[in-house]
Amino acid sequence: MSDDLALELAFALELADAADEISMRYFSHSLEVFTKQDGSLVTRADQEIERTLRGRIAERFPGHAVLGEEGGLIGSGSAPLWVIDPIDGTNNFAWGIPIFATLIALQHDGETVVGVVSAPALRERYEAAAGQGARMNGSPICVSNVATIGEARVVYASWRGWVEAGLDRQWASILTRCRRSRGFGDFWGHVLVARGAAEAMAEPELQPWDVAALTVIVAEAGGRLTDFGGRPFRERGSCLTTNGRLHDEILQELSGA
């Protein structure tokens, strides 16, 4: 690993430590929850985490840009870009469900080179740097070698999203033929694939901060992450994560081919 990449990953882990301290201070306590204009939820913890991480990035890397779910983009489009989701799974967090995480990514020229997913209530932290493999709690992880939908464990987010996307028939076909299906949603389904505990995870609509950190973790674990057209995930839209062996077959199913 280059010295610069090692320093950037170490800093991302420091950011995750700070985020974990804040989220666990609020978790399972009475929370003030707000509804944003798009109908999604935000809590004081989301706001405090993003504000804290932005401040630390500005101190350590003043020339870097930051894109966060709560504060949008600040900085030059040509600079290295930190992408932050302060709490992925805010509904879970607000309801006392421990499946939530802070997602931190660093991108150079549009490609994620460092990714950290920290889920303190689950006591799980995932990290990866380009070319250096992926780890959970410091131990290497990799995807499974399952090669058929009939043997696969498939996870997904809200069923309503599939109905609204007009893909409920195609996705139902996959779910009824796979070995096991679970509706875990959010970051956790994707990292379950990365660590070999599931073979596929898909969501019809995501934002860049939902995905940026996952891309390098999935890739370094040997998996594949694209949109439903098989293209690299950019900006916003659909997202399919698999162990790679099932990817093309699931893409064909989703296209109705």
Image (spheres, helix red, strand yellow):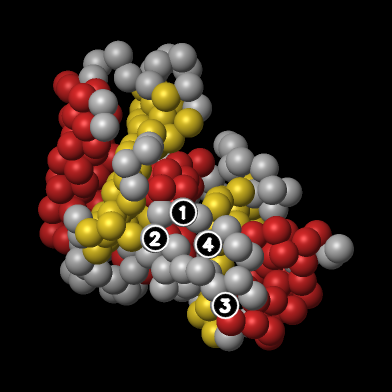
Q: Given the image, on which type of amino acid does mark 1 rest? A: Gly
Tell me whether the residue at label 1 lies in contact with that at label 2, contact meaning CB atoms closer than 8 angstroms: yes
Place of residue 2 in the rendered image (x, y in percent of width and height, measured from the top left): 26, 26
Nearest the camera: 218 or 19? 218
> Quick one: label 1 or label 4, which is nearer the N terminus?
1
Mark 3 neighbour density, 10 Å: few (under 14) some (14–19) many (20 or more): many
Q: Secondary structure at mark 4?
A: loop
x then y, percent, for residue 155 = 53, 73
**Mark 3 residue type:** Ala
- Tell me the SS state at disc 2: loop
- The earlier-in-sequence mark between 4 and 2 is 2
Task: Name above or below for residue 54 compared with residue 190.
Answer: above
How far, Cα to Cα, is label 3 from label 2?
16 Å
Q: Residues within 10 Å of mark 2 (few under 14, many from 20)?
A: many
Q: Which residue is mark 2?
A: 142
Q: Which residue is mark 4?
A: 243
Label number found at residue 242:
none
**Helix or strand or loop: what does disc 1 sit on?**
loop
Identify the residue position indicated by label 1 in the image: 222
Q: CA distance from mark 1 to mark 4?
A: 7 Å
Cα–Cα span, label 4 and label 2: 9 Å
Residue that mark 3 sits on:
152
Residue 247 coordinates in the image, percent (x, y): 64, 60
